[in-house]
Image (cartoon, coloured by chain):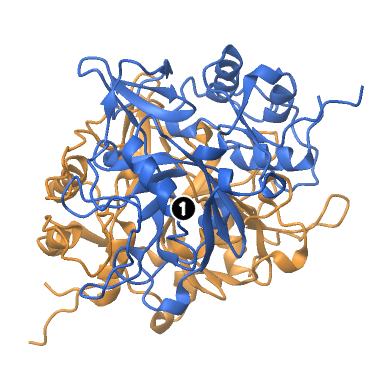
Chain colours: A orange, B blue
């Protein structure tokens, strides 16, 4: 199997427990690296993204790719798809960057000013904090969690489940994308979106609607200068990073789409990747942790592997 | 009690579970905010930093303040104090910024090149991954943790403890400062330092020597552009952010020191702050979490409160 250099880079960026090498030139230890593990994967261990549920956030610094979670927040995702098709966010900007918490974008209109019209999108949606756990697959981790009875993955997203209440919900891990709201639970429309850029704020789980997850490009959002206003909002318009466009991948010509595969999270192979992170056996680690937190599990992506010419 | 605006700002930055407001102008909910809680604190709930154990990392963008943990890594802290006094890091630069993981600085010399001499500092130190739990206070959280038998705070630092093994160690939370090492457990000198800038990599606990914690200025480190080389090292020297100086506060004239107080972590008041984060009771939160992870607990800092003139 061949890997495009991009894929290796991305896998490296997603590797949250890499060796803290003294310098990159010194002889590295010989672990079973993420790369070596991934090289042993089979094509069926990977999945492609559905272009109709993939959002491209186009910044001057590059493209952030978001996978939308239709089965967890169907109403919000439908609204977000409408807003993207109608170019709602094009020309708006990143409004907020709060250290160790979130970046956020949407309508910069202040109170009393007219807000940008939502066009064909709905102005009122139900809260979609959780859903019934029946009818949706859940791949549980054996690891304990302080926030929920069970944690694991559902449709590729970090998730948590309560078997007694028969509820399942998306978890606020690094890269989670949610719909900002006011005090009322049902006050989000999807027009204002935030992305987690710090320590996982799991206290937000079941308190706000998560709509998806950044699968590539987090490093473009996480470096946004922190805003100095309350809650990390920028105090001056010129401090905001402009948004060139937010588009559905399905609305972009195929030649301009980012070809990408995401590791499936419901396979025995994925279990082996998680185990290799739960218990590091390379020379560098002296004590395997025997545990992994949900939000420490990497979900690798790669450029698709091209078949050799026949 | 009066708060300097700086203190409020810092408390806000350290608040990891702030409201995801739709915009800063809309009427905010009326929680018992961190600020309101802190206004009810007493002078004895705060402590000052020992200048001899406080490191100033001076960047073009400002000052990062690190508290050193002498009782956890005495040999490393002694070395770091010597290196700072002898201006070891002055004129060096940030070498590495890996997304959702760490930034790192030290000697940029490549393999085969001569390394910068350590001067009066030792070139070999023992690993200081953990220490005996006897003889050091530990303020335990009641919350469960997947990585350790107990978690809590010791001397103001997030820490974990194993009562059976009678060991205690510092935890890799956001802002933790550690000593990079090679494969050998005892290969760190403190000359190469890293800071956690992402989801807490607790798998590193007891695998590497932590030497302290950033108490102010994380937002200067967390926004460093991510390096595109392996492990997030910068590929070109000009991409590295220069270090103007690393100094002990005790070596800086008092007029140039940053006056700062840190909330004590061993008081009933601190317990009340943690509880307010464990179970949010404001209008915005619809479901208190009933739990908090060690690394989600904020440790507020403030500018010292001046006594009113007599």
Specify the farthest residue to the right: B310
Residue B51 picture location, percent across and down: 57, 38
Residue A206 picture location, percent across and down: 51, 32
Specify the farthest residue to the bottom: A309
Task: Report whether A87 appears left or right of B171.
Answer: right
Task: Report whether B58 appears left or right of B23.
Answer: left
Assign a secondary structure to mark 1: helix
Specify the farthest residue to the front: B120
Q: Residue at x 26, y 15 (%)?
A: B163
Q: Is residue A87 above or below residue B73?
A: below
Q: Chain of mark 1?
A: B
Q: In terms of image quadrants, where is residue B176?
A: top left
For the C terminus of chain A, give its image quadrant. Answer: bottom left
Residue A240 picture location, percent across and down: 68, 65
Q: Residue at x 74, y 43 (%)?
A: B6
Task: Report whether A177 appears left or right of A291.
Answer: right
Report the residue marked by disc 1: B84
Task: Report whether B188 appears left or right of B69.
Answer: left
For residue A158, say whether it is visible.
Answer: no
For residue A27, say whether it is visible.
Answer: yes
Q: Is residue A210 above or below residue B132?
A: below
For the N terminus of chain A, give its image quadrant. Answer: bottom left
Q: Is residue A82 above or below residue A309?
A: above
Q: Nearer the viewer, residue B134 or B247?
A: B247
Q: Residue at x 14, y 58 (%)?
A: A29
Q: Is residue B240 above or below residue A297?
A: below
Q: Nearer the viewer, residue B289 or B254?
A: B254
Residue B259 picture location, percent across and down: 68, 39
Q: For mark 1, does the 10 Å Cα neighbourhood hold few (<14), some (14 to 19), or many (20 or more) residues?
A: many
């Amino acid at each position: 199997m061949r890997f495009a250099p991009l894929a290796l880079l991305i896998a490296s960026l997603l590797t949250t427990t890499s060796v803290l090498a003294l310098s990159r030139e010194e002889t590295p230890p010989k672990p079973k690296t993420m790369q070596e593990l991934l090289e042993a994967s089979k094509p069926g261990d990977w999945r492609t993204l559905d272009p109709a549920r993939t959002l491209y956030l186009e910044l001057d610094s590059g493209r952030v790719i978001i996978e939308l979670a239709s089965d967890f927040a169907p109403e919000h995702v439908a609204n977000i798809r409408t807003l993207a098709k109608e170019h709602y966010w094009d020309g708006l900007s990143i409004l907020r960057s709060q250290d160790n918490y979130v970046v956020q974008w949407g309508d910069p209109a202040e109170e009393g000013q007219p807000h940008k019209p939502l066009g064909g999108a709905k102005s009122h949606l139900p809260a979609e904090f959780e859903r019934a756990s029946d009818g949706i697959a859940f791949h549980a981790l054996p690891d304990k969690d302080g926030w929920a009875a069970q944690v694991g993955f559902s449709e590729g997203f970090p998730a948590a489940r309560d078997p007694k209440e028969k509820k399942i919900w998306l978890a606020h891990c690094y890269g989670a994308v949610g719909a900002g709201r006011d005090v009322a639970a049902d006050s989000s429309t999807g027009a204002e979106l935030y992305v987690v850029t710090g320590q996982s704020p799991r206290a937000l789980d079941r308190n706000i609607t998560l709509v998806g997850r950044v699968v590539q490009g987090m490093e473009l959002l996480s470096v946004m200068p922190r805003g100095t206003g309350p809650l990390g909002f920028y105090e001056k318009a010129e401090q905001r990073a402009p948004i060139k466009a937010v588009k559905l991948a399905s609305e972009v010509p195929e030649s301009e789409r980012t070809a990408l595969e995401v590791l499936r999270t419901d396979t025995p192979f994925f279990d082996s990747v998680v185990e290799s992170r739960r218990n590091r056996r390379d020379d560098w680690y002296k004590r395997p942790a025997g545990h992994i937190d949900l939000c420490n599990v990497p979900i690798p992506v790669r450029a698709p592997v091209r078949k050799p010419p026949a």
